[in-house]
Image (spheres, grey):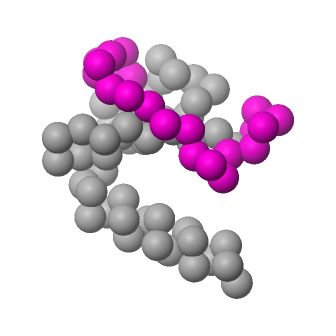
């Protein structure tokens, strides 16, 4: 796992807000696929830090989060 300086480091990324993020401005996560990496940021702080994880780690995270949500 790596943390980029800020999301301005990768301005050409297409960001997608999580469908699980609330509409009230609370828990807002955005992701963008890069070459061999998934970028994750807080949508409330778009120029803030970006977490970079491997696609495999992202799939594992989503699967774990989905299984916890369904229980």
Q: Is residue 8 magenta?
A: yes
Q: Which residue is at 49% across, 37% downward?
A: 16
Position of residue 42 measured from the top left corner of the image (x, y, whole percent): 56, 34
Q: Is residue 22 magenta?
A: yes
Q: Which residue is at 67% across, 73% downward?
A: 69
Main SS of the magenta part reads loop
Position of residue 33 measured from the top left corner of the image (x, y, whole percent): 31, 41
Span colored in magenta = 5-26
Farthest residue toward the bottom? 71
Vertical relation: 71 (above or below) 36: below
Vertical relation: 68 (above or below) 44: below
Q: Which residue is at 39% across, 23% downward?
A: 7
Position of 22 with respect to 9 (left or right) is right
Position of residue 70 measured from the top left corner of the image (x, y, whole percent): 67, 79
Does residue 1 appear anywhere in the picture? no
Does residue 21 appear anywhere in the picture? yes
Q: Quadrant of residue 58?
A: bottom left
């Amino acid at each position: 796992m790596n943390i980029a300086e800020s999301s301005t480091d990768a301005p050409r990324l297409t960001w997608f807000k999580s469908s699980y993020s609330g509409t009230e401005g609370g828990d807002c996560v955005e992701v963008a696929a890069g070459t061999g990496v998934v970028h994750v940021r807080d949508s409330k702080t778009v120029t803030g830090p970006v977490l970079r994880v491997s696609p495999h780690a992202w799939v594992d995270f989503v699967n774990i989060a989905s299984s916890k949500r369904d229980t």
